[in-house]
Image (cartoon, rainbow, N blue to C red):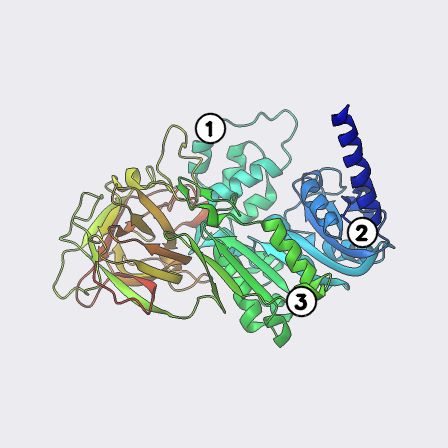
Amino acid sequence: MVYRLQSALILVTTLFAICTGWVDAKPTVQRTTVTVAMRDGILLSTDIYRDPHVEKSPAIITRTPYNKQGTQSAAERCVAAGYAFVAQDCRGRFESEGVFVPYNNEGQDGYDAIEWLVHQPWCNGRVGMWGSSYVGATQWQAAVEHPPGLVSILPVATWSSFYRNLYLGGALRLSLIAGWARHHSVRPAGIEPFADWDATLMHLPLSEVDRKMGWSIPWLKGMLTHPHPDGFWKRFELSEQVTQLKLPMHHVVGYYDFFSRETVGNFRRMQKQTIDPETREQQQLILGPWDHGTIGKSKVGEVDFGPHAQWDEYGANIEWFDRYLKQDAAALATPFSPVRYFSMGDNVWHTAQTWPPEGFRQTSFFLHSGGNANTLHGDGTLNRKPPTTQERTDHFIADPANPTPASPVTDERPRHRPTWAPVNQQKTEEREDVLVYTSGPLLKPLVFAGNIKAQLHVSADTPDADWVVKLVDVSPDGFAQNLAVGILRGRFRDSELITTPLTPGKIYEITVDLGPVAAQIAPGHRMRVDISGAYFPLFDRNPNTGEGPFGRKTALATEHVFHRSGAASRIILPVKTTDRLTSP
């Protein structure tokens, strides 16, 4: 009896507190589905989430090809924060009319959707865009159309130049785009799903991968057969247009994300090149230790970066919108750092005014060996001393029939299911087609942050060949954590647009971009550089013939890496300037 009286008293007290404003009641979230007409009459299915008790509010819109119903939790959180939330299926997807061709209509459809939104009676005329990956790209594409009412965007892990996201150093992110096409194209009736994904990714010519999958996908064929940034990509090339925008932006990506270079590049363009000085001050970059599917999490691949790596993406997004979309006085008065980046190894966050951060010096670590750097059991070493003698050249054979895997192959992770995330590289480093250069144990922490590159002196006996460079942190127990990776296709060494074949036997100096990264390699750990001729199937294998995407032939390539006086191969790290380096 006493328990019931206490419960009743608590209930009455709680209701009274809510009614009198002592505590906040959870807002009512009402969802309504409508269709919105685009300029050509196509109707796009659109969900509206809002609190019906709020007369007008700013609105957040997300446009997705992945089913708008998956945004409900984000919508409810945004409504609780005082926003209306709108989710729209892209043209040709799920409940929307039309034909889906990736990115083909997102600019004008995004403009039309925002124009419709600002005229709704419950919208106060201020609109933000939200989402990552494809959904992030729909923001850039709509923004460069300059729709009235668009106030801010949050492009997470995405591109402003789709060519440079899909291609790196002339190599194609094959498993990414082929797998995406498999799931997001229309499989004709009567066609059974193919079973041999390994054979599909190995198929030549590259131009027929869709046929090998079992059905024609014209847009995929187009992407696979245009390895140069030519006119085919013009509609997906926004890098110059974005510098005309006057929008605050919150850029987010992880080091292991295939969008890392593009996202960091977008931030730099907006902070350094945009025409509007005020807009330059309204950009923020968040760089974490994540891959594409783990933003905000601590466990990535086989590495746990600790509780500090956890990050509340939704909360940070709402804080950003409170500042610029809602123009909340408290949010506007709170200063923010233009860059927040996570350092792997010591697993802590840092702030900076720009990227790369100041206070770091480009420092060379040179490759050495007696000519037998193959495998982790070879004689390859790495230190800060440039070669002074005629060191013997290392070489390996790149076999297109057995390309070096991007991730160590296991029963749980077959070749066609590689990961971008950090995993132990030891098994791959056992291969004869991998050159391995390892430092001695570090005597003090090696701290670096910025964009990493490798300058190599190389040759091959074929018209084309790939050079893949990987930076690795080796712990005392032997766990070899990949920190960064880059690839360069030989015939793209001087130009993406006009390529030239390799002259067999000729030595070339090449630069391989390993992308943005920040880390601390701890005392007792070793730093390692791996070099190979493939990173398959995250990047397509090079047939080594130079024939391009229509070629059917392959050739074994003998690839050389030189490290001698006058041809010193090295990796260049932006090392913290306060550190007095002891050569590893």
Q: Quadrant of residue 184?
A: top right
Q: Can you see residue 33?
A: yes
Q: Residue type at mark 3: give it.
A: Leu
Front residue of 446/230: it is 446
Q: Can you see residue 545?
A: no
Marks 3/1: CA–CA distance:
55 Å
Percent of width and height locating residue 82: 75, 53
Question: Which numbered dot is residue 40?
Answer: 2
- Number of marks in the image? 3
- What residue did someone put label 1 on? 196
Percent of width and height locating residue 372: 16, 48
Q: Tell me what residue is drawn at x 74 percent, y 46 percent.
A: 88
Front residue of 450/40: it is 450
Residue 470 located left or right of residue 5: left
Q: Residue type at mark 2: give it.
A: Asp
Element at badge 3? helix
Q: Residue type at mark 1: give it.
A: Asp
Tell whether label 2 touches label 1 (CB within 8 Å).
no
Marks 1/2: CA–CA distance:
41 Å
Q: Tell me what residue is drawn at x 85 percent, y 54 percent.
A: 120
Percent of width and height locating residue 381: 19, 54
Tell whether label 1 touches label 3 (CB within 8 Å).
no
Q: Quadrant of the C terminus?
A: bottom left
Question: Which numbered dot is residue 158?
Answer: none
Which of the two labelled residues, at mark 1 and mark 2, occupies the earlier sequence position? 2
Q: Quadrant of residue 274?
A: bottom right
Element at badge 1? loop
For label 1, the crowd category at 10 Å Cα-Cα, with few meaning under 14, some 14 to 19 and many 20 or more, is few
Residue 572 located left or right of residue 383: right
